[in-house]
């Protein structure tokens, strides 16, 4: 739920699209030096004629600058539907648990509160995403199974995979945001008189760190970019001086009353209506839609180790965005997880590669900081964040054009290669599909195994073992996460 909407309040952030427009470059055609022309409700590339919508949320207008805007909308619609299905499944799980503990008043009260909070959370997320026009929310009590296969996306790309960070940024009363700000402040060149100029934050999330820097260092323009619309849409509302309610579900609640908490998300102080613009942009940092040398400062918080790109190319990407003499500030852990071990860098390698691509390192520190430590939870993490500042002294070579997926997945007219990985998994996936298709709520594992044994010429015991193993894996996987992205165990 939210408080009643109103026109942007006096003192809310000014609309900065006018200041942003001269910096923009088309992410679709990547024409160097070409720009985007502002229209009433979209930006238009005069070269390739791609239209990029501008979304209204709170008092902010957010340009959606994805390379393929309509394809991006369809992908986030799939993620939205995935959240709705997961939320529905969680409520059904809670309803079953409620029937089981009906004789215990404390348990009944706790589970009833969780059930009500999950329903409220669903409405809260739906409300935040209204500007995306993703379609009507599915309210049917039964789960939608028709689109599960094509809508299922990696958990790291889920809509709510960073849900707790929304609460951390704008709701929790903790020192965590101050700790993140201090990491950055301590490495700034001439920290007391640092001039941010035009400040770009890539991977801004719900924008608290970008907001704190904006208030403290008064850049002439702040641009906050993230690929996930949910945190940006929340930031837009909060920075428009709205107070938004989001429910929290602590992993290890400190008391029964904290099992589900309605949190109020609000900005500690308003942005100056007469000050520099603070602009939100929905875009992929790997294809940042800006002209060369557009910014004086680039901030990459908790991002460097998760981009699916070599550090050499990522440093070149940041280099391209900075004016000569500009500052790159990076903060976050170095928890690289790539298939290519050459991309899993140590701290010395990181600093060496940054310096080799047009930068000189100014300062570098490693510091222990709290990470997603809810004041209502007995569980939290400590990250040893590496923060550095680097000054651009020369242009770097152009980065390789990065694709999150191979060309045959992007261009559906291309032939699918006969990869070893696909061959190895094809039989397993077919078996999974046939087993899942046989589930009707009536058949047992023994009965489902009869179909499998006949289809694959297996012994009865082999088929029963295969069916049981698959269903156990699926069951364990569905228990491992909750709709808000937190882990769940039984």
Image: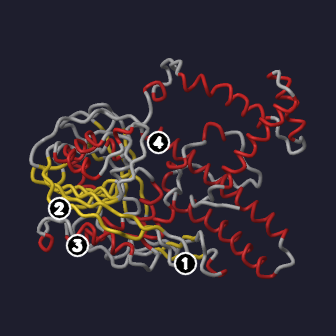
Q: Which residue is drawn at 66% across and 58% down?
A: 87
| Residue corresponding to mark 4 | 72
- Observer-side mark, 3 or 2, equals 2
Chain-order first, disc 3 or disc 4: 4
Specify few, some or many for label 1: CA neighbours under 10 Å numbering under 14, 14-19, or 20 or more.
many
Vertical order, 188 against 459 (above or below): below
Q: Label 3 to label 2, Cα distance in Å?
A: 34 Å
| Residue corresponding to mark 2 | 363
Chain-order first, disc 3 or disc 1: 3
Disc 3 is placed on an element classified as: loop
Chain-order first, disc 4 or disc 1: 4
Say if mark 3 contacts mark 2, CB within 8 Å.
no
Say if mark 3 contacts mark 1, CB within 8 Å.
no
Q: Label 4 to label 1, Cα distance in Å?
A: 35 Å
| Residue corresponding to mark 3 | 274
| Residue corresponding to mark 1 | 376
- Observer-side mark, 4 or 1, equals 1
Q: Residue 333 bears which disc, if any?
A: none
Specify few, some or many for label 2: CA neighbours under 10 Å numbering under 14, 14-19, or 20 or more.
some
Measuring from the top left, give residue 157's x and y in whole percent: 50, 48
- Observer-side mark, 3 or 1, equals 1
Q: Label 1 to label 2, Cα distance in Å?
A: 35 Å
């Amino acid at each position: 739920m939210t408080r009643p909407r109103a026109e942007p309040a006096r003192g809310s952030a000014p609309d900065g699209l006018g200041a942003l427009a001269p910096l923009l470059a088309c992410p679709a055609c990547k024409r160097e030096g070409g720009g985007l022309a502002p229209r009433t409700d979209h930006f238009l590339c005069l070269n390739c004629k791609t239209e990029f919508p501008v979304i209204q949320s709170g008092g902010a207008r957010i340009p959606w600058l994805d390379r393929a805007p309509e394809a991006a909308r369809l992908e986030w619609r799939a993620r939205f539907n995935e959240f709705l299905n997961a939320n529905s499944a969680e409520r059904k799980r809670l309803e079953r648990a409620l029937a089981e503990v009906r004789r215990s008043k404390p348990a009944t009260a706790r589970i009833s509160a969780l059930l009500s909070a999950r329903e409220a959370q669903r409405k809260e997320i739906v409300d935040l995403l209204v500007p995306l026009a993703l379609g009507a929310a599915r309210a049917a009590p039964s789960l939608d199974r028709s689109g599960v296969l094509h809508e299922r996306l990696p958990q790291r790309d889920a809509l709510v995979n960073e849900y707790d960070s929304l609460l951390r940024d704008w709701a929790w009363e903790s020192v965590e945001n101050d700790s993140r700000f201090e990491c950055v402040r301590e490495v700034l060149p001439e920290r007391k008189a640092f001039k941010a100029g035009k400040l770009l934050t890539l991977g801004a999330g719900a924008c608290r760190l970008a907001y704190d820097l904006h208030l403290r260092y008064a850049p002439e323009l702040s641009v906050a970019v993230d690929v996930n619309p949910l945190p940006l849409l929340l930031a837009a509302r909060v920075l428009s001086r709205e107070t938004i309610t989001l429910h929290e579900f602590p992993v290890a609640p400190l008391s029964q009353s904290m099992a589900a908490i309605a949190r109020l998300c609000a900005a500690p102080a308003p942005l100056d209506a007469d000050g520099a613009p603070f602009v939100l942009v929905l875009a992929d940092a790997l294809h940042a839609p800006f002209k060369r040398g557009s910014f004086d400062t680039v901030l990459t918080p908790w991002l460097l180790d998760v981009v699916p790109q070599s550090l050499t190319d990522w440093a070149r990407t940041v280099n391209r965005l900075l004016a000569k003499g500009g500052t790159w500030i990076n903060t976050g852990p170095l928890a690289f997880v790539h298939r290519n071990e050459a991309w899993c860098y140590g701290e010395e390698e990181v600093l060496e590669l940054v310096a080799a691509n047009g930068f000189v390192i100014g300062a570098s520190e490693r510091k222990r900081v709290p990470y997603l430590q809810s004041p209502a939870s007995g569980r939290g993490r400590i990250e040893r964040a590496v923060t550095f500042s680097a000054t651009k002294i020369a242009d770097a070579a152009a980065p390789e054009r990065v694709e999150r997926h191979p060309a045959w997945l992007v261009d559906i007219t291309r032939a699918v290669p006969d990869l070893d990985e696909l061959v190895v998994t094809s039989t397993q996936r077919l078996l999974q599909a046939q087993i899942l298709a046989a589930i009707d709520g009536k058949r047992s594992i023994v009965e489902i195994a009869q179909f499998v044994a006949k289809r694959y010429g297996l012994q009865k015991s082999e088929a029963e073992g295969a069916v049981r193993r698959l269903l156990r894996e699926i069951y364990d996987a569905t228990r491992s996460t909750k709709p808000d992205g937190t882990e769940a165990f039984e």
